[in-house]
Image (cartoon, rainbow, N blue to C red):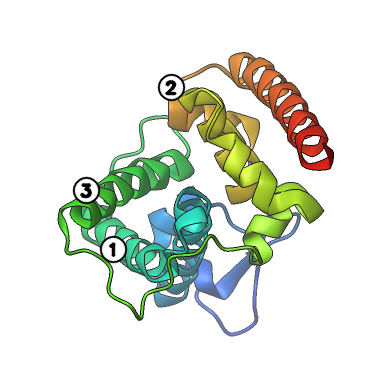
Amino acid sequence: MGLAWTSRAGVTPGALGAMERVDAPASLRELAAAAARDTHARDELLARVRDMALKYARVRLGRFGAEDTAQDVAQEVCMAVMTALPTYEERGLPFEAFVYTITARKLADAQRAAMRGPSPVCDIPDEVDESPGPESTAVMRDEAATALSLMQQLPVQQREILTLRVAVGLSTDETAAALGMSPGAVRVAQHRALGKLRTLMAESSRGGVA
């Protein structure tokens, strides 16, 4: 299906940063294709990649209060994406899946490094974060802290689906591509994950009242 574009006055057609889609903002795939020749496209691509990586890292690390680590991971993802762009080849997968793969790898590296690192000193807070930030709040609204903690009891695949769908904001198709699943399987797994999470939250609430 073709895309409808409008060119701004006095701008050379073909530069993504100087054009705009009539019906929707440019996708990451489109921005990646234009980034090599268009600084506006490159800047927007990096901003959106960083936002995606930071949201994912915060959900995965948020319960540890590792905001600095999340920021570092997001920065490393941006650098890795820019390094890979010249040789990146689209293979029918959303660019979001490419970003997710890099982010997951960088996050795993950061976690391994933290495990090998020195013990925390007195000026690093060791308490659980009881006031979730905007991204965590968006994940599960008023019960974000409890939900994020209980999510760790879900199977890994279900936890990843909820993280990508709810926290990062990927579509069903993008999540399916990132995890190597079919869209239908993602919908089923997401439904089961949310059902299990609701049960865990209800049990936690009853336990808190008792």
Q: Which mark is residue 76?
A: 1
- Farthest residue, direction bottom: 10
How far apart marks 2 and 1 lie (CA) works out to: 24 Å
Residue at 56% x, 40% y: name it: 164
Residue 115 rendering spot, x and y as whole percentages: 22, 51
Residue 56 coordinates in the image, percent (x, y): 49, 51
The N terminus: image quadrant: top right
Three-letter code for the amino acid on which mark 3 is drawn: Arg
> Which secondary structure lies at badge 3?
helix
Three-letter amino acid code at the position of disc 2: Gly
Is residue 93 visible from the viewing direction of this image?
Answer: yes
**The C terminus appears in which quarter of the rendering?**
top right
Q: Which residue is mark 2?
A: 180
Number of the front mark, 3 or 1: 3
Spatial CA span between label 3 and label 1: 15 Å
Residue that label 3 marks: 112
Between the C-alphas of marks 2 and 3, the distance is 24 Å
Frontmost residue, 141 versus 47? 141
Q: Which amino acid, mark 1?
A: Glu
Q: Nearer the viewer, residue 93 or 140?
A: 140
Asked if marks 2 and 3 touch (Cβ < 8 Å), the reply is: no
Q: Earlier in the sequence, mark 3 or mark 1?
A: 1
Which of the 4 quarters of the picture holds residue 18?
A: bottom right
The answer to whether mark 3 and mark 1 are in CB contact below 8 A is no
Q: Is residue 5 above or below residue 206?
A: below
User: Where's residue 101, x and y in %?
Assistant: 35, 40
Element assignment for label 2: loop
Residue visible at 76% across and 25% down in the picture: 199
Label 2 environment density (alpha carbons within 10 Å; few <14, some 14–19, many ≥20)? few
Which x, y percent locates residue 7?
63, 70
